[in-house]
Image (tube, helix red, strand yellow):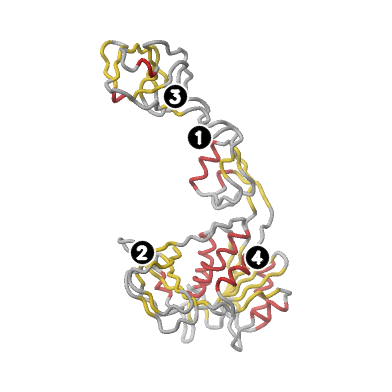
Amino acid sequence: MISYEEALKLVLENAHTLGIETVSFENSINRVLAVDVVSDVDMPPFNKAAMDGYACRNVDLKNELEVIEVIPAGHWPEKTICENQCSKIMTGAPLPQGADTVIMIEYVKEVAPNKIVFSKEDTKSNVCLLGDDVKTGDVVLKKGTFIKAKHIPVLASAGATQIEVFRQPVVAVVSTGNELVEPEIRPQPSQIRNSNGYQLVAQVKELGLSVRYFGIARDTFEDTDALFQKAIAEADVLIMSGAVSVGDYDFVPEVLKKSGFDIHFHGVSVKPGKRTIFGTHENKWFVGVPGNPVSSYVQFETLIKPLLLKIEGYDAFLKILRLPLEDDFRRKNANRKAYEPIVITSRGTAKKMEYHGSAHINSLSYADGLMEIELGISEIKKGTLVNVRPI
């Protein structure tokens, strides 16, 4: 058994991208840039008014000004501002030649038709200068950026309508276990509904990746192998829940070896999810997680998500909050690193939820994050800063 840190290192060392493709910027959400994006224009492309008002010369602020033109946004000024002149201007409109200041419309008094005075002592320029935000050729988004809604206007402004991104991995999910039935079936004695298969599918979808659920493999070598072969042939990454322990019906390690996979680890000193297994073969990745739903959820968040993000070209995957603990925390066994569900209170503290162990799926329903408890730590005092992984 290895530490979580060693397991994560092995996962990331054995992850690589799968090539580059071109997509429309409109369809680029949850994709990762494969090259830098540079702007083909200056932004702003001209000196423009930052607000509605009157464009004038700063030296004339104390004088009565003649209004010589109205400049709406989208129209180029026709007249030059000379001494004691101004143009009424709208937000975003180009600044007329000769002007260097826009006085806010709220601080203007009309003293006669087309005659105004400024009612304040001084003002900022209220002008956005040509190229002040971005200059032609500037990098506006760097390679490796995970594209979100906030990046779309940047791409649009830079004229980057077709962008190069890393290819996303296709993911397959398989559940194992004689005791499992699909959710639409009412379980008989000794049976349970398959929840973690659909949970894993949903976690993959939250990353914006293509995922296919291949069903339930029964607890035989033949059935496990058959579904494994079918799924891995159609996907880049296969996630299998169950059949990873050391019992008589846990065939995953044997199937991996038969298929030529290198097993990089089988067992992580973490709770829940101790028997997690990771293997690779050429451009294929396999992660097997325990069948208990909290175990599979936590292992996806802590190991599988970093793997998938690294494959699609994104490295900055770890988002950790440092929050004070709401109450004292104690645990009996501190021989593994642990993750437990918490809520983030209105006071900005981490409050431990009721949690009965790796099968307690309802404990995650209202959780805001997973609190990390390091190996060897059996007690944490109220107010201590703890690491919280948002979920």
**Residue position marked by numbered label 4 in the rendering:** 13
Residue 124, numbered label: none
What's the residue type where badge 4 is placed? Glu
**Residue position marked by numbered label 3 in the rendering:** 93
Q: In this rendered view, identify the residue nearer to me: 249 or 38.
A: 38
Residue 133, numbered label: 1
Q: Residues within 10 Å of mark 2 (few under 14, many from 20)?
A: some
For the N terminus, which image quadrant? bottom right
Looking at the image, tell me whether mark 2 or mark 3 is earlier in sequence order: 3
Residue beneath the point at 73% across and 78% down: 258
Looking at the image, tell me whether mark 3 or mark 1 is earlier in sequence order: 3
What's the residue type where badge 1 is placed? Asp
In the picture as drawn, the residue positioned furthest to the bottom comes out as 248
Classify mark 4: helix, strand or loop: helix
Quadrant of the rendered image containing residue 350: bottom left
Q: Are marks 1 and 2 in contact (CB under 8 Å)?
A: no
Q: Nearer the viewer, mark 1 or mark 2?
A: 1
Looking at the image, tell me whether mark 4 or mark 1 is earlier in sequence order: 4
What's the residue type where badge 2 is placed? Ile
Residue 344, numbered label: 2
Residue beneath the point at 69% across and 67% down: 233
How far apart, in angstroms, are the residues tagged by discs 2 and 4? Answer: 33 Å
Q: Above or below — where is 112 with respect to 279?
A: above
Classify mark 2: helix, strand or loop: strand
